[in-house]
Amino acid sequence: MEIKNSVALVTGANRGIGHAFVRALVDHGAAKVYAGVRDLATVADPDVTPLQLDVTNPAEITAATAAADDVTIVINNAAVDSEGTKLLDGSFDDARWAMEVNYFGTWALSRAFAPVLARNGGGAGEHAVGGILDR
């Protein structure tokens, strides 16, 4: 996969490994990097394009595919901590929320962006489905 001159979307891009992915893409010559986040105010990096994106919100996923219709790389990084999902003392509500974000959100975003990547010639070969890199 070629990073230089690519257009990338990173979900969960405002902190931690998501922000590290963003900086690595910028530092390696990506032409544009969308920072997909639930709260636009949390994107302080002037080198990226903030994108409203809660991976559990179908309307925001649809809007993101329209706004970022030029992507060639998707890094599906958004996730929630699973501290509340411990077998013996975790709550079912916390477990459901973790599944919504970490599983169904990843799946929904992958499904929505696969045609965008295919149209733009994006992809990463056999190690990624439709060119979408999952965490």
Image: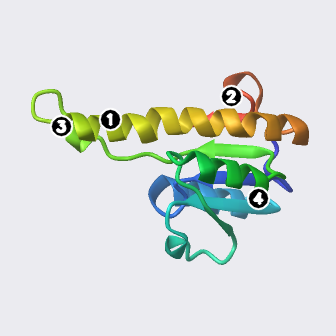
Q: Which residue is mark 2?
A: 128
Q: Earlier in the sequence, mark 1 or mark 4?
A: 4
Q: Which residue is mark 1?
A: 96
Count of labels in the image: 4
Mark nearest the camera among 2 and 3 is 3
Amino acid type shown at disc 2:
Ala
Q: Nearer the viewer, residue 54 or 133?
A: 54
**SS at mark 2?**
loop
**In the shown orientation, is residue 25 left or right of residue 90?**
right
Q: Which residue is mark 4?
A: 67
Q: Are marks 2 and 4 in contact (CB under 8 Å)?
A: no
Mark-to-mark CA distance, 3 and 4: 36 Å
Q: Are marks 1 and 3 in contact (CB under 8 Å)?
A: no
Q: Which residue is mark 3?
A: 91
Q: Earlier in the sequence, mark 2 or mark 3?
A: 3
The colour scheme used to paint the residues is rainbow
Q: Which residue is painted at 49% across and 53% down in the image?
A: 17
Q: Which residue is painted at 35% across and 39% down in the image?
A: 98
Q: Nearer the viewer, residue 69 or 78?
A: 69
Q: Are marks 3 and 4 in contact (CB under 8 Å)?
A: no
Mark-to-mark CA distance, 2 and 3: 33 Å
**SS at mark 1?**
helix
Circle 2 residues within 10 Å: few <14, some 14–19, many ≥20:
few
Circle 4 residues within 10 Å: few <14, some 14–19, many ≥20:
few
